């Protein structure tokens, strides 16, 4: 116990540094995922324009051949058109391609979710350390009285606030991006089946 107290008395400043680093990483990943999902939306709309004839509503399909989604669908179509592909094999192929696409859209999402769930606890840890330091200072400097303790606790609560400031954007981004990604995966799966059925019927 004495060893743990000595470690705690080193202060909670390092916890704030950790939260600042995690916040910077979180913002970078949120921006990266936002750009990826924005590009994904355009790509899916272009593919729907190409395969479903929805150009009037979803825009131009020019340049769609260079997208990741189109290349995956073309590879799937070639595999299905190889001859002898039964329904079970086609289903396995579609599921494999859709799973790979889902992993692409879910990249870094686990980190955002984990950060959103745990950043408040990191901040709380910093607050506990700060409170320990405040009471230790009260023991050493009795003349400071309650004012000394309150000042230390106020500083310690900054860690909790910082933890929440890191967690809230991460949770919001995780939930929003997860919903978007799931919708894009469903639309991509529909396109995959259209591509497979179209190729096997040729």
Image: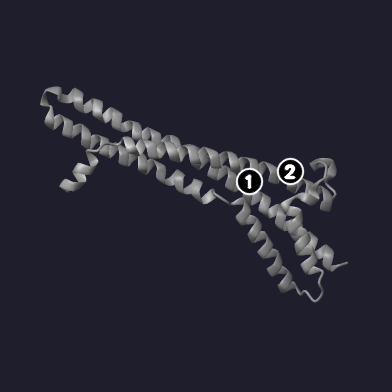
Q: Position of residue 165 (x, y in %)?
A: 44, 34
Image quadrant where residue 91 sits:
bottom right
Q: Is residue 169 left or right of residue 92?
A: left
Q: Is residue 111 left or right of residue 164?
A: right
Residue 180, position in %: x, y?
63, 46
Q: Which of these two is toward me, 157 or 2? A: 2
The disc placed on residue 42 is 2
In the rendering, at what x and y percent does residue 19 appear?
A: 40, 38
Q: Earlier in the sequence, mark 2 or mark 1?
A: 2
Residue found farthest to the right:
202
Mark 1, residue position:
180
Query: Marks 2 and 1: which is nearer the front?
Result: 2
The one nearer the camera, 183 or 114, is: 114
User: Of 158 and 10, which appears nearest the observer?
Assistant: 10
Residue at 81%, 65% in the rendered image: 197
Q: Are marks 2 and 1 in contact (CB under 8 Å)?
A: no
**Front one among 130 and 177:** 130
Residue 128 x, y percent position in the rendering: 27, 39
Q: Residue at x 17, y 31 (%)?
A: 137
């Amino acid at each position: 116990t004495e060893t743990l107290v000595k470690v705690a008395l080193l202060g909670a400043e390092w916890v704030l540094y950790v939260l600042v680093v995690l916040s910077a990483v979180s913002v970078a990943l949120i921006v990266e995922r936002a750009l990826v999902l924005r590009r994904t939306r355009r790509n899916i709309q272009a593919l729907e324009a190409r395969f479903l004839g929805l150009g009037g509503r979803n825009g131009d399909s020019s340049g769609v051949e260079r997208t990741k989604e189109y290349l995956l669908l073309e590879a799937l179509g070639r595999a299905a058109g190889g001859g002898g592909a039964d329904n079970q094999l086609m289903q396995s192929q579609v599921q494999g391609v859709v799973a790979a696409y889902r992993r692409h859209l879910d990249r870094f999402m686990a980190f955002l979710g984990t950060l959103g769930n745990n950043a408040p606890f990191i901040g709380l840890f910093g607050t506990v350390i700060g409170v320990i330091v405040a009471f230790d200072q009260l023991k050493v400097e009795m003349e400071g009285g309650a004012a000394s303790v309150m000042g230390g606790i106020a500083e310690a609560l900054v860690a909790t606030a910082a933890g929440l400031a890191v967690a809230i954007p991460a949770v919001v981004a995780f939930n929003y991006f997860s919903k978007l990604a799931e919708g894009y995966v469903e639309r991509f799966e529909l396109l995959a089946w259209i591509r497979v059925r179209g190729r096997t019927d040729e």
